[in-house]
Structures are given as C-alpha cells and as structure tokens.
C-alpha cells in the first residue's frame, strides 16, 4: 500500500495499492488498442471529449480545492486558481489543435503531391508532480489526446487522488476504454513501463535526479522524452522599476504555494539605487501572510508538502546565516511555524552571495535571497550563473532595455514585469538541468507527433 501523508496534520489521508503486473499489462494493451481507433477520429470528436471533461472538473472545484489542501498543503482559498489554469490550458490546446496538426505543404512541384503529415506517437506515459497536480498533468494529457495518442497517467504518490479524479472526469465524459488509464506505481514499476515497447513518449515533471532516472530507464529505447526538472529562477529589478508593485509581485512569486512552484522566484538581484526600498517593501508585504491550516479560509500560506522538505530549506537558511547572511523576517511573527512539522514561515535573506547554496541550489520552499547589483551586465552575469534555466524576469519601465536583457539570459521563458506564470500560447521549456523538450503552444504538438512525409508522383 502507498500512504498519502497529509502535511496538514501528519496523518494518513488516503491509501492506495500499487498496480500489479496484470493491471499494468492490461493498461498497456488497452491503451495500444484504443489508440489505434482514436487516431482515426475527427478533431471535432476529440474537442467534444475535452469540453465535456472540463465541464465535469469545473463542477468539482470546491471539493478539489479541499482535496488539494489535504494532499499537498495549498490553502483552500487558492484551490480554484489551479482549476482556472487547468481549464485555460486545456481549452487553449484543444482550440489550436486543428491548426497545429495541419500538414506542412512545401512549394508546389509540377507532377507531384507533397506534404508532411503529423502522426500521433502512440501511447504517451505522463509522470506528473505533486506541486501543481492538475496543471502539470493537463500540460501533457490534453495535447496528447488531441494529437491522437493514448495516455497512461502516473501521478506522484502525494497526489494520487488527483489522477483518479481526472480519469473519472474523462470516463464520465465518455472516453473510450483504455484511452486514458491511471496506474499507481513505484520507481521500479515506472522504469518497467518506460521500457515497454508500447510506450512511445514519456513526459516527466520532477527532480533532476528523477529526470536522470527516466533517461536511464529509456537508455535502450529510441523514444522521445519531455523532462521538466529543477529551477532556480532569478529576477532582476532595475533602478527604474515601480518598487511597490514589483515588491508585491516578487513576494507572491517567491512564496505562493509555500515556494513550491516550478517557476517560483528563488533569487533576486536589485539595482543598488532601489535595493533598500525593495527589501523594505518586500518585508512589509511578507509580514501580511498568515501561516496556518490550509483548510482555514483566512490562511494564505499553508505547510510545505512534508517536514523533510521544510527541514531542507531551514538548513539552507541556517548555512547562509552562518556564512554571513541576515534574515529579514522575524519567525516569531508566524506562530504556526514549527520545525518539527511542515509548517514553515517565509524568509527573505540579504547579505547573500553565490557561494551560498540558497543562491545556487534549488530550494523549492518559502525563502528568497536578494543581492544588490550596479549594472545590467552584473545582473545578467549573476542570473546566468546557474545550472538551471526555466524562467527569468526583469522589472523595468523600459521595454527596449528589458527585451535586450532578455536576449542575453539563458532561460526557457523570459518575463518582463511579471513572474511565476505559464502562458499556454507559448512553449514551456527550459535549458541545462531544467531538462529538455517543450510542452504547450503549437510547439508542444510537435513533441507529441512524428512527421511523416508523403511524396506522390502523378501518373502521366
């Protein structure tokens, strides 16, 4: 059995049995058979399935928000936000599918018909993470189905109920048997599924170590992989930034979801001219957070996913302080903070540098370090001093300067005057230890299809 240990109170919230060999084989066989039929369905039928599924999920947003609080600690007041994003991404990918999957037709050549068709890959194995369990899953599930693939979904053990709720919504919407299956698996079983000949593509979201394990499992197979892994996303506040608005956005980008966001802000570089004003403003905004039970309506900051995750972040803070960093937030202002649990107060660190792990290694928690800089060039060099590259942001009123800085940043997505957001019209991708591949947008469909060229000579 697999236990979901709730960060709310440390108790077992739910239990599920791991799939046995027969269940795994059945899911793979059914997926292969269902996909062969699904690939020939028209686009309107595929869109109708997605629309029906979304209507069902939308009706369940309140119970989903409560389940999320119990499973991974996000306050119920924010539960609906994830469903809004789920619907936005799914709707966008369903709408653009027909145009994204159109054949590519080269210039006319007399006597020939030539085009490149986009063919489905087959069975797509989606391995989703717990921190945004609906958003991360939908990034792969909906475009995979719209492209004519079947899906096998394996969710994090922390959020297994989310996978089941997604599958139930599809079943209620009338999905064909086997076209989308949920399997609860351990690491060894997951590797075995990746190695099965019927799996044509794997989309994995998780840690760098997890990504390496997926690559290792697929090493003897010629299949494609989409890997969204770690991040240490930077922000640069220029001297001309609107400090109050920037501070509010950066606090939210750093601490929302208890800092457990793939594209959350983990390090900030501020022009020396606005550095003091920025840290004062961020300290004031942070002090307005209410750390507590995520099931309480007034709570704005819930527990981290598990006590060990909180201990890791606390250790980073302690090491930084021993090396000379200073903490701006008085932990005593957050009575719910408890080192023996997953409840952890947010923290802002100053007097930090890149010799400290908190500025170099992924924290994935409610802490952010801020360094003063004296030029765009210095900020760019520090932003690029990382093995990760998911998102980066600049905060300025100068569009030309912001865009010029973006051209020099090694990242997958570059923001100006916003952060911690995913636009389904743009490719979600990264570089370095953040992984490889892309999801969403038209480019996301290229990852879930294979090109097939048709070269037809006309009879004379």
Image (cartoon, rainbow, N blue to C red):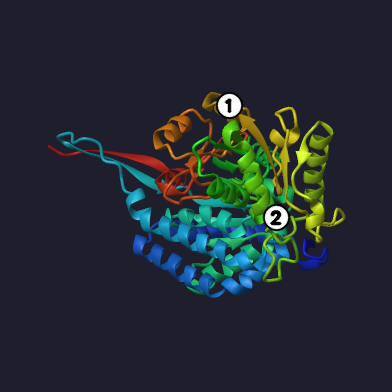
Image position of 168 (left or right of 325): left
Q: Give the image location of residue 88, x and y in percent.
A: 46, 60
Q: Residue at x 47, y 57 (%)?
A: 89
Image position of 229 (left or right of 139): right
Q: Give the image location of residue 359, x and y in percent.
A: 70, 34
Image position of 41 (left or right of 31): left
350 or 215, nearer to the observer: 350
Helix, strand or loop at mark 1: loop
Which corner quadrant holds the C terminus?
Answer: top left
Which corner quadrant holds the N terminus?
Answer: bottom right
Reading the image, the residue beneath label 2 is 287
219 or 272, nearer to the observer: 272
Label 2 CA crowd tier, 10 Å (few <14, some 14–19, many 20+): some
Q: Give the image location of residue 450, x and y in percent.
A: 43, 42
Reading the image, the residue beneath label 1 is 374
Vertical placement of residue 211 versus 153, above or below: above
Residue 96 got which mark?
A: none
Image position of 48 (left or right of 256): left
């Amino acid at each position: 059995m697999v236990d979901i240990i709730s960060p709310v109170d440390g108790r077992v919230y739910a239990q599920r049995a791991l799939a046995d060999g027969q269940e795994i084989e059945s899911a793979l066989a059914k997926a292969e058979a269902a996909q062969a039929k699904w690939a020939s369905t028209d686009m309107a039928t595929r869109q109708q399935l997605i629309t029906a599924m979304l209507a069902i999920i939308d009706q369940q947003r309140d119970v989903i928000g409560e389940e999320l609080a119990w499973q991974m600690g996000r306050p119920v007041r924010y539960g609906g936000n994830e469903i809004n994003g789920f619907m936005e991404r799914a709707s966008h990918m369903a709408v653009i599918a027909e145009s994204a999957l159109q054949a590519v037709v080269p210039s006319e050549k007399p006597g020939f018909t030539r085009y490149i068709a986009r063919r489905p890959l087959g069975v797509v194995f989606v391995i989703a993470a717990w921190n945004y369990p609906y958003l991360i899953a939908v990034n792969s599930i909906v475009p995979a189905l719209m492209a004519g693939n079947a899906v096998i979904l394996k969710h994090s053990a922390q959020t297994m109920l989310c996978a089941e709720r997604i599958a139930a919504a599809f079943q209620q919407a009338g999905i064909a048997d086997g076209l989308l299956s949920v399997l609860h698996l351990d690491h060894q079983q997951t590797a075995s599924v990746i190695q099965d000949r019927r799996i044509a593509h794997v989309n994995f979201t998780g840690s760098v170590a997890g990504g390496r394990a997926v690559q290792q499992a697929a090493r003897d197979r010629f299949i494609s992989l989409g890997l969204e892994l770690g991040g240490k996303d930077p922000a640069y506040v220029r001297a001309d930034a609107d400090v109050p608005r920037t501070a509010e956005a950066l606090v939210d980008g750093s601490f929302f979801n208890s800092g457990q966001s793939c594209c959350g802000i983990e390090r900030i570089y501020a022009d020396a001219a606005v550095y003091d004003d920025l840290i004062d403003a961020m300290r004031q905004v942070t002090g307005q957070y209410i750390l507590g039970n995520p099931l309480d309506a007034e709570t704005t900051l819930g527990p981290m996913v598990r006590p060990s995750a909180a201990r890791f972040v606390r250790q980073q803070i302690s090491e930084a302080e021993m090396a000379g960093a200073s903490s701006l937030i008085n932990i005593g202002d957050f009575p719910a903070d408890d080192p023996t649990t997953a409840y952890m107060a947010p923290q802002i660190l100053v007097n930090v540098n890149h010799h400290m792990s908190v500025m170099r290694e992924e924290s994935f928690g409610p802490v952010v370090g801020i360094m003063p800089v004296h030029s765009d060039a210095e900020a760019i060099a520090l932003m690029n001093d990382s093995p990760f590259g998911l998102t980066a942001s600049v905060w300025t009123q100068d569009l030309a300067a912001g865009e010029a800085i973006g051209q020099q940043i090694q990242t997958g997505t570059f923001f100006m005057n916003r952060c911690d957001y995913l636009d389904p019209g743009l490719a979600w991708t990264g570089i370095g230890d953040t992984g490889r591949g892309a999801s969403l947008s038209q480019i996301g469909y290229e990852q879930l299809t294979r090109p097939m060229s048709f070269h037809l000579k006309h009879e004379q």
